[in-house]
Image (spheres, rainbow, N blue to C red):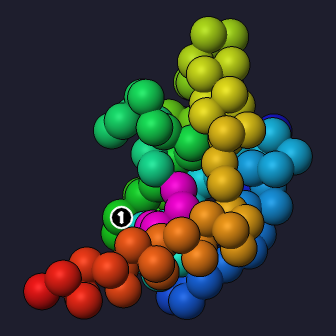
Amino acid sequence: DFFVMPSHYEPCGLGQMIAMRYASIPVVMKTGGLADTVVDYNEDPVRGNGFVFTTYEPVSLLNAMHRAVASWQDPEQRKAIIATMSKADFTWKHSALEYIRLYRKILNQ
């Protein structure tokens, strides 16, 4: 199953994170929070947790859907994507650690 979110603008987006939690592969436009949380499987098979398109045009979404369906039909790719999604950490603990890392970097400059 897929979660399709072709937002033109998305400052955060929770839908893709919820979808990943329930093993629904996201297909998203590369914008805002979607770009921060979804890594295209074809561009980075190790970290890939969904499929991303970069231009806000129907053909771009269609191409991303074709790539997603092709990966879904390959049991090994499907398992790899779902395994990567299951490791995603979108908790506040993770966000807090990122803020601490950033603040330390700023203080050390």
Of 16 and 1, nearer the camera is 16
- Above or below, 76 against 105 in this view is above
Which residue, as the protein is rendered here, is positioned at the far right? 22
Q: Is residue 7 left or right of residue 52?
A: right
As drawn, 9 above or below 47: below
Disc 1 residue type (three-letter): Thr
For the image, the number of numbered tags is: 1
Picture residue at 57% right of the left edge, 42% below the top: 49
Percent x, y of residue 3: 75, 55
Magenta stretch contains residue 37: yes
Quadrant of res 15: bottom right
| The furthest residue to the left | 109
Secondary structure found at label 1: loop
Which residue is found at the position 68% from the left and 11% from the top? Answer: 75
Where, by quadrant of the figure, is residue 78 drawn? top right
Between residue 91 and residue 28, name the one nearer to us: 91
Figure check: 14 above or below 52:
below
Residue name at image x 36 percent, y 86 percent: 103
Residue matched to label 1: 54
Can residue 70 be seen by looking at this rendering? yes
Q: Main secondary structure of the magenta part?
A: helix
Residue 47 is situated, as x and y percent measured from the top left of the image, at: 45, 37
Q: Is residue 6 visible?
A: no
Where does residue 18 sit, x and y in percent of width and height? 81, 61
Q: Quadrant of the N terminus?
A: top right
Q: Which residues are magenta?
A: 34-38
Given residues 28 and 98, the one toward you in this image is 98
User: Local crowd at mark 1 within 10 Å, few (<14), some, or many (≥20)?
Assistant: few
Q: Residue drawn at (67%, 78%), measured in percent from left and top?
A: 13
**59 inside magenta stretch:** no
In the displayed structure, does residue 90 sit left or right of residue 100? right
